[in-house]
Image (tube, helix red, strand yellow):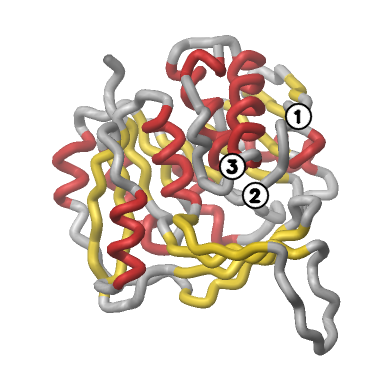
């Protein structure tokens, strides 16, 4: 059995509203096609997908002392997932996501994530020595974990999401990580950004392009491309990037070729968008081999 994976940061309780199209910037009354409340955010998505694939996951996040926090805890209950929570006086993070029929999204942070001034990392540090890597998501509070993770030489993976290539907020995560994921949403010349990141000493960089697939660049200069796997249906695109990340990581840990890792990632992403949850109930390890 492989060693556990640490995931740090990102759990919310979200309201998802499905619309035929995203609203125009004008006063109006809209009747949604559907709406519901569900688990959200990047750490929760990665943790549940990895757990569904059979990996032991230790997930650290911040939750408020409120009903939403309790709902997040319940939604994260999984035999392969050990949840470590720092409770805050700030309410649990909450989003309202407006979703169009073609999968586009407007995400409103109606309750931003907490930013505690100090954090006791001791409970996670006690477990970290026996883990194989850490996935550090780009929340403000997680930056204070980077120095001690580097001290114990635990490999760090991070997901920069819609990084624009220059935002200084992301730099501590870039500096600490050996493997980086990001999307091309805000990168007109994403290949140049990938080259710049590899030149900063990264082992590899993966850039996702939504329905246009993904690309990968290694430190050795290897360039790989992956087409998107068609989904059986598109119900909800929330969490697709985290599912993609998890599918890649699952095969990478197994020692698979990088092209096979990308293929597994694409399959995992396609399964996610066909579900209203962050992880598809149909996800099975054998689907990614």
Q: Report if residue 146 is visible in the image.
A: no
In whole angstroms, how far apart are the C-alphas of marks 2 and 1?
Answer: 14 Å
- CA gap, disc 2 and disc 3: 6 Å
Give how far across and how far down residue 115 sits, in percent.
37, 71
Which quadrant would residue 17 be assigned to in this image? Answer: bottom right
Q: Nearer the viewer, residue 151 or 30?
A: 30
- Of the 4 image quadrants, the one containing the C terminus is top right
Mark identifier at residue 236: 2
Question: Residue 261 placed where, x, y %?
Answer: 59, 19
Q: Which percent across, then down, holds residue 123?
A: 15, 49
Q: Quadrant of the N terminus?
A: top left
- Of the two numbered discs 2 and 1 on the same chain, state the one appearing first in sequence: 1
In percent of the image, x 29 and y 45: which residue is there? 77
Few, some or many residues within 10 Å of mark 3 (<14, 14–19, 20+): many
* Disc 3 from disc 1: Cα separation: 14 Å
Say the numbered circle drawn on residue 276.
none
Relative to 50, residue 184 above or below: below
- The reply, left or right, for residue 103 in relation to residue 170 is right
Residue at position x 54%, y 41% from top?
242
Residue at image coords 59%, 38%: 272
Q: Which mark is residue 275?
A: 3
Camera-nearest label, 3 or 1: 3
Within the image, what quadrant is residue 53 found in?
Answer: top left
Q: Position of residue 246 (x, y in %)?
A: 50, 32
Count neighbours of disc 2 (C-alpha within 10 A) and say few if under 14, some if 14 to 19, many if 20 or more. many
Tell me the element at label 2: loop
Q: Is residue 20 left or right of residue 43?
A: right
Question: Which of pointers 2 and 3 lies earlier in the amino acid sequence?
Answer: 2
Q: Which one is nearer the viewer's eye here, 111 or 29?
A: 29
Tags 2 and 3 touching, CB below 8 Å: yes
Give the residue displayed 31% in from the left and 65% down from the top: 69
Q: Which residue is mark 1?
A: 230
């Amino acid at each position: 059995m492989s060693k556990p994976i640490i995931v740090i940061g990102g759990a919310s309780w979200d309201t998802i509203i499905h619309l035929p199209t995203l609203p125009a910037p004008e006063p109006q009354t809209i009747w949604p096609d559907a709406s519901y409340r569900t688990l959200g955010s990047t750490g929760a998505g990665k943790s549940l997908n990895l757990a569904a694939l059979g990996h032991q996951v230790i997930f650290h996040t911040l939750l408020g002392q409120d009903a939403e926090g309790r709902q997040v805890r319940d939604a994260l209950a999984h035999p392969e997932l050990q949840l470590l929570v720092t409770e805050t006086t700030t309410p649990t993070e909450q989003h309202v996501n407006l979703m169009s029929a073609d999968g586009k999204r407007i995400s409103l942070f109606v309750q931003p994530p907490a930013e505690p001034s100090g954090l006791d990392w001791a409970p996670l540090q006690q477990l970290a020595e026996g883990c194989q890597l850490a996935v550090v998501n780009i929340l403000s509070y997680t930056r204070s974990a980077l120095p001690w993770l580097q001290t114990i030489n635990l490999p760090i993976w991070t997901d920069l999401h819609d990084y624009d290539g220059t935002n200084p907020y992301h730099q501590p995560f870039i500096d600490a990580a050996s493997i980086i994921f990001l999307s091309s949403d805000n990168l007109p010349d994403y290949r140049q950004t990938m080259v710049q990141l590899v030149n900063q000493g990264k082992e590899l960089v993966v850039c996702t392009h939504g329905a246009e697939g993904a690309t990968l660049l290694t430190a050795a200069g290897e360039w790989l491309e992956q087409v998107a796997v068609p989904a059986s249906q598109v119900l909800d695109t929330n969490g697709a990037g985290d599912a993609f990340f998890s599918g890649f990581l699952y095969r990478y840990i197994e020692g698979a070729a990088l092209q096979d890792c990308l293929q597994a990632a694409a399959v995992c992403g396609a399964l996610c968008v066909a579900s209203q949850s962050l992880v598809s109930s149909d996800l099975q390890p054998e689907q990614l081999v």
